[in-house]
């Protein structure tokens, strides 16, 4: 257990699952009510006082539209924090086997994610590729969580069957 000094305490995992659940609810609510709202509480220019800079002759980047959605930025932030809390918190029974499993799952998730990106480089062009890259920000973390917990579950299940025999 030499590399566990970089892991978060075990309690962070519960917090991460709560944050993830809240984020999923926010995503669902955003896409349900997105077309029904004519106004945006997330106007970035007003929030940070950038409209005053434009009036004084400063030219801002055109990447910010008048109604940019700060909620999507907040959702992305929450997804990354939740993924880090879930994926990199200590388990109750951390030992060398769990450490090796975590390491192998991290490498496997990197391979899977790189393969997906390579396929998308070949088959996806233009603006949809931007969406692929935005999803890629989160996918390596959540593919790691999926790989690690799936392999942990399968190993625990196989040990349970071995004890019964």
Image (spheres, rainbow, N blue to C red):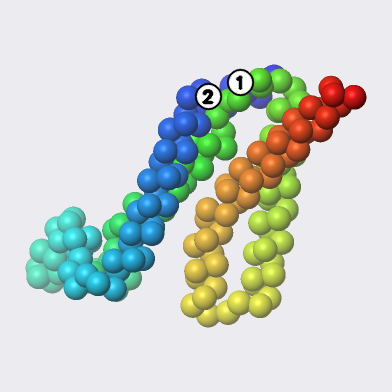
* Residue 31 in sight: yes
Dividing the picture into quadrants, the one containing residue 59 is: bottom left
Q: Which residue ends up furthest to the right in the rendered image?
A: 165
Graded by Cα atoms within 10 Å as few (under 14), some (14 to 19) or many (20 or more), the crowding at tag 1 reads few
Q: Position of residue 55 (x, y in %)?
A: 9, 70
Q: Residue at x 61, y 21 (%)?
A: 92
Work out which quarter of the rendered image holds the C terminus and state it.
top right
Query: Measuring 79% from the left and 27% from the top, which residue is drawn there?
Result: 160
In this view, which residue lies farthest toward the front? 164
Determine whether label 1 and label 2 are within 8 Å by CB: yes
Q: Residue at x 10, y 64 (%)?
A: 52
Mark drawn on residue 29: none
Above or below for 62 versus 15: below
Q: Give the secondary structure at mark 2.
A: loop
| Rendering coords of residue 132 (x, y %) | 55, 67
Q: Residue at x 54, y 64 (%)?
A: 133
Point out the tag, 1 or 2, that comes first from the N-terminus: 2
């Amino acid at each position: 257990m030499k590399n566990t000094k970089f892991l978060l305490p075990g309690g962070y995992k519960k917090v991460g699952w709560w944050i993830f659940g809240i984020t999923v609810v926010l995503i669902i609510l955003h896409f349900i009510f997105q077309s029904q709202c004519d106004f945006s509480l997330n106007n970035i220019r007003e929030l940070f006082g950038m409209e005053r800079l434009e009036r004084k002759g400063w030219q801002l980047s055109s990447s910010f539209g008048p109604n940019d959605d700060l909620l999507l930025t907040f959702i992305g932030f929450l997804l990354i924090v939740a993924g880090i809390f879930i994926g990199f918190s200590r388990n109750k029974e951390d030992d060398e086997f769990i450490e090796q499993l975590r390491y192998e799952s991290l490498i496997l998730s990197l391979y899977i994610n790189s393969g997906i990106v390579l396929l998308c480089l070949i088959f996806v062009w233009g603006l949809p590729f931007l969406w692929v890259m935005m999803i890629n920000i989160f996918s390596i973390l959540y593919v790691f969580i999926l790989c690690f917990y799936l392999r942990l579950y399968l190993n625990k299940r196989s040990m349970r069957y071995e004890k019964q025999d």
